[in-house]
Image (spheres, helix red, strand yellow):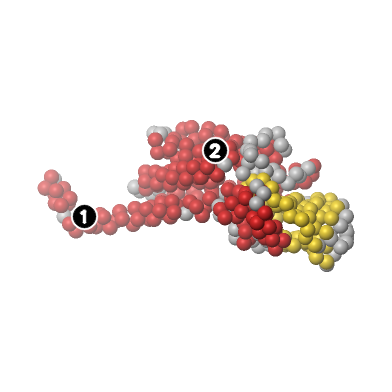
Amino acid sequence: MRRKAGRRINDPAAATTMQQRSTPRHARWATLLLALFCSTQALAHATTIGLVRIDLIGDRLTYILAVALPEIPNGSALLLTVAANGDRGAAETVAEQARRSVKIDLGGTPCKAGRVRIAGSGANDARGSVEIDFTCSGEHGRLTVTDDWGTFLGEHYQALANIRTASGERQVVFGEASRSESIDISRPVATGWLDFIKLGIEHILTGYDHLLFLLALLAGARGVLSVVKIVTAFTLTHSVTLTLAALGLVTIPGRIIEPLIAATIIWVALENLISAAPDRRRWMWSFGFGLVHGLGFAAALGEIELKGAALVRALIGFNAGVEIGQLVFVVIALPLLALLSRGRGATLTPRIASIAAAVMGTYWFIERVFAG
């Protein structure tokens, strides 16, 4: 038996065969880890969500856009910051960009863009705002708004807008597929439920930090019951804090919340690597950290000043969209994890996924601390 075992170990052909068998799995994971590491910059700013408020009173229209500076291209963020601090050249550049990006038409006649104001949102949050005054030739007819900041805020820019007119309020989404919206201001506006559901789905599916947190949680899960407990705990708690923040009952600056979200990824990933039984308390971390992620979700609704029925629609629709998007991700991620966990991958897969999560979480944490 010993001689046979020795021949097997020293046999070059056998060793080559074993290496060929193990190489594809390790090569796939090495390629995946390298791709995840190299794509951190792209993932960190893949989608920019702007918050737009439009008020039409008589023939005067005001357009206000607010954006989170860490989410937009670095050059644009720097230009907005310098302009908000009083640099005349930068302010003129941003104003010209604003007039090219926003077009308003009322009753078939273009509204005339006037004064443009650039400002920051204060020391507690890294946000910038652009306000444009328009003068329209009439007060009735169809109001058409074109909101296309793609060249300045990134190709994946989208905006949630609250449009107020004499006939009521309407909430719409400007996205890559539709940069213009048109409403008849002489008629009561529609409810906008689908717009909020769509925004919630897009927000979670492009919120790579939230998805990576979920992936790290699921990588340490054992069995269907564990997955159900994790997802349910995360859903309940982020729904609570999203609602409280959107109602203005809880206010925590984004410069605090965003690094904390990255820290939750690091914590769960390290627990996967260090703890002998990470699944035992996994639903508890999902419950506690879900409170933090909910505050991150609320940033997409917090600055457009929704009230009454519009706020109820926003909360229900957006939250429903987040849950739909989250469910889609879980349904896709679980079979993939199961496939990669076959055989020797049962140990390797959770470790590789956790290392990738820890690396990217650390990158985001450092970036957000310094950006804030």
> Seen in the image, is 345 located left or right of residue 13?
right
Nearer-the-camera pick, 304 or 184: 304
Counting residues from the start of the chain, the first of labels 1 and 2 encountered is: 1
Gap between marks 1 and 2 measured at Cα? 47 Å
Can residue 105 be seen in the rendering of this structure? yes
The percent position of residue 336, horizontal first and vertical second, equals: 46, 52
Judged from the image, the secondary structure of the residue bearing numbered disc 1 is: helix
**Residue at horizontal 60%, vertical 58%?**
154
**Residue at horizontal 51%, vertical 38%?**
264
The percent position of residue 76, horizontal first and vertical second, equals: 60, 55
Which residue is situated farthest in the front direction here? Answer: 88
Residue that label 2 marks? 260
> Seen in the image, is 243 located left or right of residue 216?
right
> Seen in the image, is 227 located left or right of residue 93?
left
Query: In the rendered view of the protein, which quadrant contains the C terminus?
Result: top right
Residue that label 1 marks? 15
The percent position of residue 110, horizontal first and vertical second, equals: 80, 65
Q: Is residue 297 above or below residue 130?
A: above
